[in-house]
Amino acid sequence: MNSTSKRATCFHSHSYQPPRECPWTGLVEIQPSAAPYANWNARITDECYAANGRAQLQDNNGVVTALVNNYAYMSFNVGPTLLTWLADNSPETLLAMVEGDKASLARCGGHGNAIAQVYNHMIMPLAHDRDKKTQVLWGKAVFHHYFGREPEGMHLAETAVNTDTLEALAADGVKFTILAPRQAGRFRKIGTDKWESGGIDPTRAYRCNLPSGKNIAVFFYDGPISQAVAFERLLDNGDKFYGRVMSGFNDQRTHNQLMHLAVDGETFGHHHRFGEMCLAWVLNKLLSSDTAVTNYGEFLANNPPEWEVEVRENTSWSCEHGVERWRSNCGCKTGSKPWTQEWRGPLRNSLNALRAKLDALFDSRGKTLFADPWTARNDYIAVVVDHGQTPDFLQRNCLPGLNLNQQQEAIQLLEMQRLGMLMLTSCAWFFDELGGIEPVQNLLYAARAIELAASFTAEDLEAELVRGLEQAPSNMPEYKNGRGVWEKAVRPQAVYKQIRALADSALDDVGTVTRFTRLMQTAAKCGQTFDRRAVQMRVLNAYARIKQAGTVAAELHTAYLALAAELKLSAELLGWKNAGICDSFSTDLTGQPVHHCAATRKSGMRQRSRKHWRF
């Protein structure tokens, strides 16, 4: 920030997409609603994230006179799961973000524009303390992996906050966060006893003192101007946008003022076409004025808080009822249909109950494998971002002397925990219908977590989950309730993915072959269709490879006989191999060609190198 300027601006962009990866393959698959793009990540990246890395400035004749990397001049955070996807599918977009952050470090006295975000957009006040810890640590670790430095600030999912959440941020060195003005409680000048209430001054930084004795800075963005940018088409006209920004200053204030706004990153180009161009035009005009363009870290360093604030407990920027949108029918919705959201409470309760079971299982079984299971979970992010770190991770965290099977069990437990957090991603509750794409995605994560847990417990976790989901009413007649969503939208997908994953595996042990047989039986019960011939060929090839390597053990042969019978294969065919049959899928199990966007095809090797452990 220019030390001679008493006015500064900061535009914050919260860029985030829910994790969309298939929990069995680690890939984002085709989403027809995103057409003509392969999926929503690809579509929004092209329309927004990539566009902000090369925003056009045009003259009055429409001639492009310059390209602006908006990331060099605006504050921004990018969801950790989105960063990982960008690294594989749009590395040039990620590079623009990283280069923009580097440019801001040089321009803003060593304070970068990029800040971190809690890992998978979990509503922090509704998370237990261990998840709060992991969400912060994983968010910081992914940020460091891609931006090469420690973050100063951290964005909270939906800016949902309470004191415990701020304690979690402060405990791990986060200096500041950004909240909505309505989330401010009472405030006072530091060193005085008189508390004030009412409208918060958004042009200041505030200090929030915490019960632990730590503190954290809080910025409350300008609500009316942020609202106008997001929902009132202010981005249609650069002069109007600039004028509204300047209206946020008040000459009667004597302190250095920060006029800052915060909106979803998708506002600039996806929600508002060419919004990135309007943003670039306004930034360019501000840079040539006597109003500084800064970021939160620089402003905080130059203007330590002179006021302290108490936050309103369990509040957020997108639910006027606090955090009820993510656990009850509070009235917040996105559509105009007279649909009920009574399903939100049962969905939350069902997944919380499953989460408790997974945690207990991880704690009890983990103690036989890890020096400290929960420390190991916090450290597991090293493997999530770079699968090549697995050996070092195991050496750091596992008890000495574990064999290969025990090491695989350790990773399996950690994957179960990762999925247990992903199934609580906030987006499942944000929209209006239980059978929508976001709740189904979360339930798919739950299905995969249950599958992994089955190796460690005889308890029927799926049955317990479905009983809870039955209390969740659906607005879609074909589903009726959460049981219908599970049986018609989740279980068929889960079975299909499991079949495909197993068909791609070696099929060289009794447990895997037996599980494959049971899956085929489950597929028949839930009406799942697949290309039987493709699966038959994979099974025949798998048995042939084992037979060529030596004698097939009697138990394994028996397991294969059962699988062959389920696939309607004659036992005499086991061991037959046609060298022309490909060992990897060129079609999916419905017999349709597998489609991937060009970026996915180009980055397939990188995706496979990071693909999570599969059992």
Image (cartoon, helix red, strand yellow):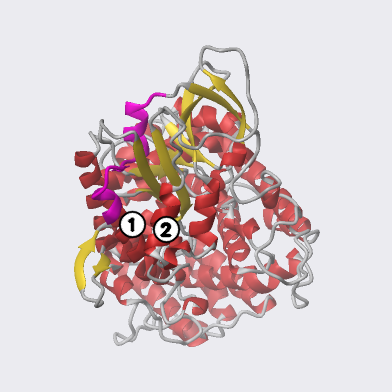
Is residue 128 shown left or right of residue 289? Answer: right
Magenta segment includes 302? yes
Q: Is residue 309 above or below residue 222?
A: above
Q: How many marks?
A: 2
Residue at 54% over, 47% down? 223
Q: Callout 2: few (<14), some (14-19), or many (20+) C-alpha neighbours within 10 Å? A: many
Residue at 37% over, 62% down? 238
Tag shown at residue 282? 1
Specify the amino acid type for callout 1.
Val
Residue 458, image x, y percentages: 67, 50
Tell me which label, 2 or 1, sits earlier in the chain.
Answer: 2
Residue at 60% over, 38% down? 183
Residue 232, image x, y percentages: 54, 63
Tag shown at residue 241? 2
User: Is residue 185 visible in this depiction of the protein?
Assistant: yes
Residue 459, image x, y percentages: 69, 50
- Point out the stretch of residues depicted in magenta: 284-304
Q: Are marks 2 and 1 in contact (CB under 8 Å)?
A: yes
Residue 576, image x, y percentages: 38, 83
Badge 1 marks a residue whose secondary structure is: helix
Magenta segment includes 465? no
Residue 310's quadrant in the figure? top right
